[in-house]
Amino acid sequence: MARYRSLALALAVFVTVAGDAAGDGGGAVAPGPPDVKAISCLTQSVCRSRDTVVRGEEMVVRGANLEAVERVVFTGARGNGDDATASVSATTERSVVAVVPAEAQTGAVVLQGSSSSTLARIDRVRVRRALKVAPLDISPGSSFYFGGRRKATFEFTVDQAADVRVELVDGESQAIIATWDVAAEPGVEQHVRWNGKVRGAAAGTGRYSFRLAAPVSASAKAVPEATDAFFFADHLFPIRGRHDLGQTPTNGFGGGGTRAHYGQDMFANCGTKLAAARGGKVQFAGYHSAAGNYLVIDGAGTGRDYVYMHMLEPALVKTGDRVFTGQKVGEVGETGRATGCHLHFELWSAPGWYEGGTAVDPLPALRVWDRNS
Ligand SMILES: [Zn+2]
């Protein structure tokens, strides 16, 4: 045994002398031994602390004289049985990047060069498992309306503390239109709620999805991901039952004659539920000899007004009330100057009904809302 030890010592001395000789010769200066200063996740938010790495995530070793490093060995417990080796993906003089193996265990980490020579050893590196994220109530297939009582909500839990980013993605363009950064605690239900706005205005009608990017800014392929898609519309069609949109020109905007007809007459049985096409504030609810029981709602997030006439009974909401999109406001009737049960519906441009706005033909919008709801 003593003989082997002295042989190894002799070799080490020889190597050192050779290195010095090269330096004296004026050629390339041989690098000193690797000097490790720090080991961590490549993305700091993934680890949260130094000397900690996460299985499946990229790690970085920083220091000096690291260019010869080819492998990172997680030695784990005593003995070789649980060793796990990672090949480095990028090396510079000052840093080494590798993906932490799935079997890596907490313990000493050894940096190896070619021929498995040990270049450096870090006594203790904590290895954590990757964050697990469980989406909870993701209500697939649900529909949400701008200004509605129910907001599109995404719920999830994590199995360890983490900074998690939730993204809202436009289903058509795939653009990320909103993000939430959540400092999630393990086992606690996290909620992200979208109010239907993009840059302060109602988002367009279509499909959207929540996407979980956790942890924040980790490389995309290493990110556990969950999505949930839902339908969102900026309006709801106001007649909540069988109906037709009007059959004759006199049912339409302008009325097809000399009379002023500022809206669209849409037919349905008397008693059919009417809901607010767009929530907002009730500007007026009352009775008029021509309009019958009628209602004007100042639409949320828009200067436009939405007018409902000939309702069976007085509106279910009062002037000044706040109304949600989809909230029942009354029923189809034929009060006032009306022939047959129908909803006379008007749409007024900002700033609204008899406030300086003008009535616009609502039929194109009604057709879209009717298709979507
Ligand atoms: Zn009418």
Image: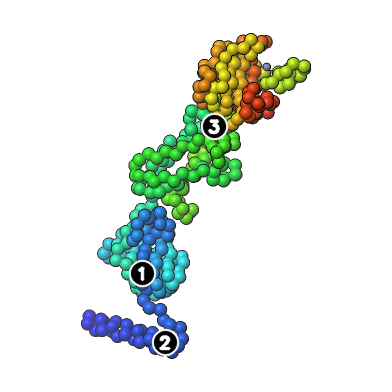
Q: Amino acid at mark 2?
A: Ala
Residue 159 lies, in percent from the top left, at: 35, 46
Q: Is residue 208 left or right of residue 159?
A: right
**Most distant residue in the front direction:** 356
Q: Quick check: 277 above or below 1?
A: above
Q: Residues within 10 Å of mark 3 (few under 14, many from 20)?
A: many
| Residue at 52%, 38% in the rendered image | 229
Residue 278 lies, in percent from the top left, at: 57, 27
Frontmost residue, 92 versus 78: 92
Q: Amino acid at mark 1?
A: Val
Label number found at residue 36:
1
Frontmost residue, 82 versus 88: 88
Frontmost residue, 263 versus 139: 263
Q: Quadrant of residue 71?
A: bottom left
Asked whether residue 311 appears in the rendered view, the answer is no
Question: Which dot, 1 or 3, sits closer to the camera?
Answer: 3
Q: CA distance from mark 2 to mark 1?
A: 24 Å
Classify mark 1: helix, strand or loop. strand
Label number found at residue 146:
3
Q: Residues within 10 Å of mark 2 (few under 14, many from 20)?
A: few
Q: Amino acid at mark 3?
A: Phe
Sequence order check, earlier mark of 2 and 1: 2
Q: In the rendered image, which quarter contains the C terminus?
A: top right
Question: Which dot, 3 or 2, sits closer to the camera?
Answer: 3
